Amino acid sequence: MTDFAPVEPETAAGKAAELLAQVQKSLGMTPTMTKVMANSPALLQGYLALSGAVAGGTLKPAVRERLAVATAQLNGCEYCLSAHTYIGANIAKVDADELDRARRAESTDAHVAALLRLSNTIAENAGDVDDVDVKTAREAGVTDEEIGEIVANLALNILTNYFNVLAHVDNDWPVVSL
């Protein structure tokens, strides 16, 4: 049971109504997370802006979904783990084995594995990573642009992970247990 009442699009007013309409238009649905976020239009607007910004980056959707899965697993967010496993499989077309590997920050693709490992290392150490970790990622072909995008994706994923865990948002995705 969610600890925060979802704001239903049909009864929303003002900025919350505008933002929920934007979510519905872009996704064709309004996930429970965004309805609960609508209690704070500033939160929902910030989430949508950051989500849009990372979507326009160089990291492909299949990589971003694996980063989201790894971070959700790390932070214990079943809602996000479920959502990004579903989106990864059905929209980004990542195979089930790769999504499962992402939960452990692993991949059969060396470049993706380096991105996942670096992302988890950054998250686990609040950004204070050893030079050797960055050097190892660079040796696997990770660029400075990608490192910046890892941090942006972490910010987005930590935002949603922490919010969903805090608010006990009801999971409206096929459940993937932690």
Image (spheres, rainbow, N blue to C red):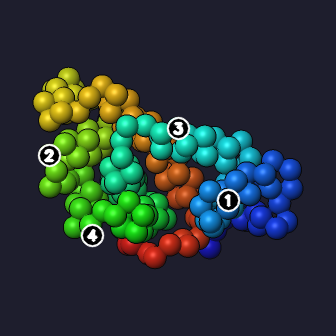
x, y percent for residue 64: 38, 49
Vertical relation: 20 (above or below) 58: below
* Residue 171 in sight here: yes
Crowding at mark 1 (Cα within 10 Å: few <14, some 14-19, many 20+): few
Crowding at mark 4 (Cα within 10 Å: few <14, some 14-19, many 20+): few
Q: Can you tell which of label 4 and label 1 is closer to the viewer? A: 1
Disc number placed over residue 25 in the picture, else none: 1
Per the image, label 2 sits on a secondary structure element best described as helix
Which residue position holds label 3?
53
- Judged left or right of residue 59, residue 112 is left
The kind of residue on which mark 2 rests is Ala
At x 55%, y 43%, the residue is: 52
Q: Quadrant of the C terminus?
A: bottom left
Which residue position holds label 4?
96
- Judged left or right of residue 40, residue 156 is left
At x 46%, y 48%, the residue is: 157
At x 40%, y 69%, the residue is: 90
Marks 4,2: beta carbons within 8 A: no
x, y percent for residue 82: 43, 67
Hey, which quadrant is residue 125 in on the image? top left
Crowding at mark 2 (Cα within 10 Å: few <14, some 14-19, many 20+): few
x, y percent for residue 56: 48, 39
Measured in 3D between alpha carbons, the distance from the residue under mark 4 to the one under mark 2, in whole angstroms, is: 18 Å
Hey, which quadrant is residue 98 in on the image? bottom left
The kind of residue on which mark 1 rests is Lys
Mark found first going from the N terminus, 4 or 1: 1
Mark found first going from the N terminus, 1 or 2: 1
Measured in 3D between alpha carbons, the distance from the residue under mark 1 to the one under mark 2, in whole angstroms, is: 36 Å
Disc number placed over residue 110 in the picture, else none: 2
